[in-house]
Image: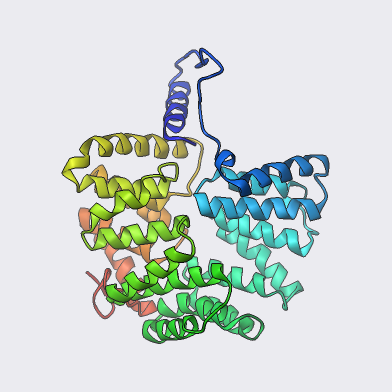
Amino acid sequence: MSAWWRSLLATAILACTQGAVAAPYVPSSDAIVLEQLPEKGDPSLARLKRMRVALMANPRELAIAAPVARRALEAARELGDPRFLGEAQAALAPWWAAEDVPADALLLRATVKQSQHDFNGSLADLSRLVAARPDLAQARLTRATVLGVVGRHAEALADCAALAARVPVLVAAACAAAPASLSGHAASAYDALVGALDAPGGDAGVREWALTLAAELAARRGDPASAERHYRGAFALDPRDAYLKAAYADFLLDRDRAREVPPLLASDTKNDALLLRLALAEQRLPDRREAFAVHRADLAARFDAARRRGDTLHLREEARFRLTIERDAVSALALARANWAVQREPADLRILIDAARAVRDAGALRVAADWIAANRLEDVTLVAAPGGAR
């Protein structure tokens, strides 16, 4: 959704919940543009639109539904637009609640659930699939990713080891690097990943994923020069990747390079996570106060609308917004705690620590310190001494 339409939706929902009655907005002419649909400027999304038309005629044909779901998932990742997750789920409707599901549909269903933060549901589907098809490398890779998100690093490493002989070296190295680097083996994980990246060739998408991961590992290890190099390499392969842009924006913000963030994210204001980074940068730039005020109000409306429709996809981002932009540490800590109950990546731990420090919540800080110690986490942004949160 555009910023204007999200704000309008939030206002409409608020009016309804308060019992207010407002006349719907009716454009005065057909020439008024309410929203620019992404398909118009993207040939691949235009193809997706045509694929959806074919699916409407054959909704139970998995050979048609699977490519639609797959492309919608790709679009959701590239653009950060959750509507495409809804499209992917809709394409899988005949198999969404079924027990006897073909492998392709089960893998796609698990991937959609992962993207919707239904990690337990995703893991249940993936475990069924791995049990039935232990040779299916993508199922193990996806399960390893989900296990890593929820902090079950040993299990993630076991899946990575099991698929190592069936996938390219770079895929195996990247799979193992994330959980290994978060469980006491940051140096060896980084070295193995960089060694695999040194080999020429390979799929461009896999290399971009691995370079982004290498950049994050280098930053956590306190090596910003290497992180910068890896980020540049990833951008050369895919300058549109929303996850890559968010990770690099955080890297720039951590190094007081806020001035470089607006040019990076200026065209990405439809993406909630990227708009947050843009606002965080603008907050530090006196000459961008007007833009900051607009983006701050827009984010507030988006988070309010998400809460009212029961959407919990962006608890981490809202916690950062409440803490850093709204200066509401109490609300930020509540959100960070709720987010920590669902996912446990370094960024989730960081907002939990930052919010807990802001309100001097010893219990939350103890949870963070215990997690760092138990996992032997090595992260210069989080750890002051071995096993302690700073």
Report x, y in % for residue 386. Answer: 26, 81
- Seen from the viewer's position, the closer of residues 219 and 238 is 238
Vertical comparison of 281 with 204: above or below: above
Say which residue appears at 33% left-offset and 66% top-offset. Answer: 367
Q: Quadrant of the C terminus?
A: bottom left
Residue lying farthest left?
286
Can residue 155 be seen from the camera position used here?
no
- Seen from the viewer's position, the closer of residues 150 and 294 is 294
**How many numbered marks appear?**
0
Q: Is residue 49 left or right of residue 247?
A: right
Say which residue appears at 32% left-offset and 70% top-offset. Answer: 228
Vertical comparison of 385 with 84: above or below: below
Report x, y in % for residue 180. Answer: 45, 80
Q: Is residue 350 left or right of residue 117?
A: left
Vertical comparison of 271 with 149: above or below: above
Vertical comparison of 320 with 309: above or below: below
Say which residue appears at 26% left-offset and 58% top-offset. Answer: 253
Report x, y in % for residue 53. Answer: 75, 40
- Seen from the viewer's position, the closer of residues 33 and 330 is 33
